[in-house]
Every structure is written in C-alpha cells, then in structure tokens.
Image (spheres, rainbow, N blue to C red):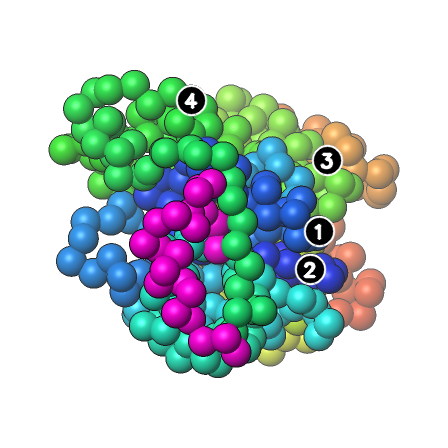
Amino acid sequence: MNRNIFKNCKRLAIMGGTFDPIHYGHLVAAEAAFHKFNLDKVVFMPAGNPVFKKGTRVADKESRFIMTYLAVLENEHFDVSRIEIEREGDTYTIDTIEQVKKLCDPDTKLYFITGADAISYIFSWKEPVRLVSMCEFIAVTRPGYKNCKLFDNIEKLSDKYKNRIHYMEIPALSISSTEIRQRVKHDYPIKYLLPDNVISYIEKTGLYKEEALSREEIMMDFETMRQKLQSSLYIKRYIHTLGVVEEAEKLAKIYGNEITVEKAKIAALLHDCAKDYPTELKMRFCKEYHVYLDEIMKENTDLIHSFLGAEVAKREYLVKDDEILDAIRFHTTGRKNMTLLEKIVFIADFTEKGRKPFDGLEEARRLSYIDINMALTYILECVIEHVKSKGRALHPLSCEALEYYKNK
C-alpha cells in the first residue's frame, strides 16, 4: 500500500475474501454493490492468514494479492489493500475494520461485502456485535435465496442488527474458486471465468498445478510493475521515471550485458516508487518496515524515499534481487564501492532527458557515455555542492562515495 486509498471517500466498501483465485463472480458482485449503494470506491481485501481456512491448502498470500491487483487494475473505482496480507498471525475481520476506520475520514460510511452464506454465521465471528456496529454489511446472494435454508438462518439474526445488513442479488454466476483450481489442476479451460491477465499469471507461475513455482520464483513482469506504479505516482514523477528507465537502459547497454539491462530497467522504474508518499506516511511505513533512519534523514526527509523505496519494491512489487534493491536504496545518496547497477541508476536519475537544464547537466551526460566512474564522480560533486548551497547537512554516504571515487 503506497498511499492512503481509504481517504476522500464518503461511502466506501471493503470486499473481503481469500481470492484463491479472484474471478468474475467477485467482480460482478463488487460492481453491483458500487452502483446499488452509491459507493465512491470498493477496496478488495485479500485475506492474509484466514482462520476459516485453517487446515485447508491456500495459495500463498502474495500470489493472491497479485491476482487481485491484476483483476481490478482497469476499474477506476476499484482498489486493493495489503492490510491483511501484511498482518502477522490470524486474520479477523474486526481487526481489519478497526484499522480501516482509522485510515478513513471521520464521516466515511463503511460497508463490508461478503457472501450471504458467511453472513448467516456472523455471530460465530470474532466480536460480532462490535463488528456490526462499526460497519454495515452487504450480503451477496444469487436470485431466489429466500427459498433456501440459508434465508431461514439469516432470519434468525437479532432484529437489532437487521438494519445493518443489506441483501443484494446478483446474476446467477455459479463460478467458484474451488472449481477453477480443479480445472487448472486437470488442464480444463478457465477462459471467461476470470480476467485474462489473471489467467496469464496462473499459467506463467504454474499456480494450482502439482509443481507450481516457489514463492521466491514468482515476480511481477515489467509491464505489470509499470501499470501498478503509474497509478501511485503523480504524473510529473511518472514521466520523470520513464525518462530514467530510458537512460538507464542506454547506459546498461554500453557498460553491461542483457541481464544488466533488464535489472536496470526494473531498478530505474521503481527508484522513486515511495517518493510521492506524504511525509507522515513515509515515517509510518519506515517504522512498519524497519527502515533505519539516521538523524540526517530525519532532518532531510527527502532522503527517506530511496531507502523506503527498496522495501516497497520488495513488498509490493515482489522484487527479490538484492542488486536491484540496493540500486533503489542508494540512488539518492550513492555510497563507496557501488555496483555497476547502482552507478547506472544513480547517473540516469541525474541525466534523464526530461531534466530542465542546469549547470553541469550536459557535462554529466557527456561523461556518462565515456567513463561511468568519471560521470559518477562529477555528479557526486554537483550533488554535494547543491546540498551545501541549500544549507542542508550532507549525508555521510555521499561524502564517502565522493572521497572513494576521487581516489580511484
């Protein structure tokens, strides 16, 4: 979660579920709720460690998060949250609703969308009375539910809470995640049951096959990262980022190999992934992600985004390559004995073609195509001089880097 997706909503619905995998039944229900209840947004909440699934084999939570993200990507009033994915221990709805209410505006009206079958057993949930008082429930059901035993169970709910629970019929889509998993396992077609990009992810990773890829082998492709990043950056920052990607690719082709090029593109794409966070949010995520902040970083909060960005790339974009993460982490300060990838991203960030002209820019660009260490040293000198001119404290990593490369 790289921004507060719960703000500025008068009417907000959380759609909880395991989403193993998410399918068109989930999406149709969310879309119907959006219109029927005049919502501003529906936030999908993939379960982390659902209590009701204990003892049942469930796909790893990051895979379920990615599939959910892919499924809602093109719907402007849908979003997806990592709250339950990030939470340690068992997942309870009451804990999620409490956390969401703290992130919402005080006057936000909150709904929780779930299946009518789950609602019929709501009083077996954790702290059900307090839960029903904190949000209203939208119980999704197929047409004709009043004629089944389920409705008899629902009718037994206390009259006190009936006005907090709304029932919504949707077209009789008999799609189930269980059936989809079984169809994948036995090589039966699943087209038209779930979005094509989710199908592509399942096929690419081997999910639900007997020998699926391990968690460490699963990684978003570049295009998925780009689409995800675009939705979380201001347009000016996003344009800058694309310029850094282009420049990093050029430098990687000059100084590296095909692997370097691919890594450079990813590192450059994500180098500013935490840049547009409000300062308060940066500080909170640093605490949650155990990002150490020294005194200079606390004083100059603009330095935080690169160190936090490495953690965001790891957690939200599933980057496991330490070399890429370090290139993101040190793209602002630099450090002594930088890797080739770190140098490429550091230089590309400074020289990308969208930069407005300033003293030293053209020389830095010229040097970057001739000698990467000369370019790095020159840029470090420019950056340090700029920081001094602004009266800000220099970060030791930048000073150490300049000293190191001047003496090489």
Q: Separation of disc 4 and disc 2 at Cα?
A: 31 Å
**Element carrying mark 4:** loop
Residue that mark 3 sits on: 239
Discs 4, 3 touching: Cβ within 8 Å? no
Discs 1, 2 touching: Cβ within 8 Å? yes
The part of the chain drawn in magenta is 139-160
Q: Is residue 5 above or below residue 230?
A: below
Q: Separation of disc 1 and disc 4 at Cα?
A: 28 Å
- Percent across and percent down for residue 329 are 51, 54
Mark 4: amino acid: Tyr
Q: Nearer the viewer, residue 87 or 380?
A: 87
Q: Is residue 234 left or right of residue 207?
A: right
Q: Nearer the viewer, residue 265 or 46?
A: 46
Mark 2: amino acid: Arg
Q: Separation of disc 3 and disc 2 at Cα?
A: 32 Å
Q: Residue at x 58, y 62 (%)?
A: 111
Q: Separation of disc 4 and disc 3 at Cα?
A: 35 Å
Mark 1: amino acid: Asn
Query: Mark 4 packing: few (<14 Cα in 10 Å), some, or many (20+)?
Result: few
Residue that mark 2 sits on: 11
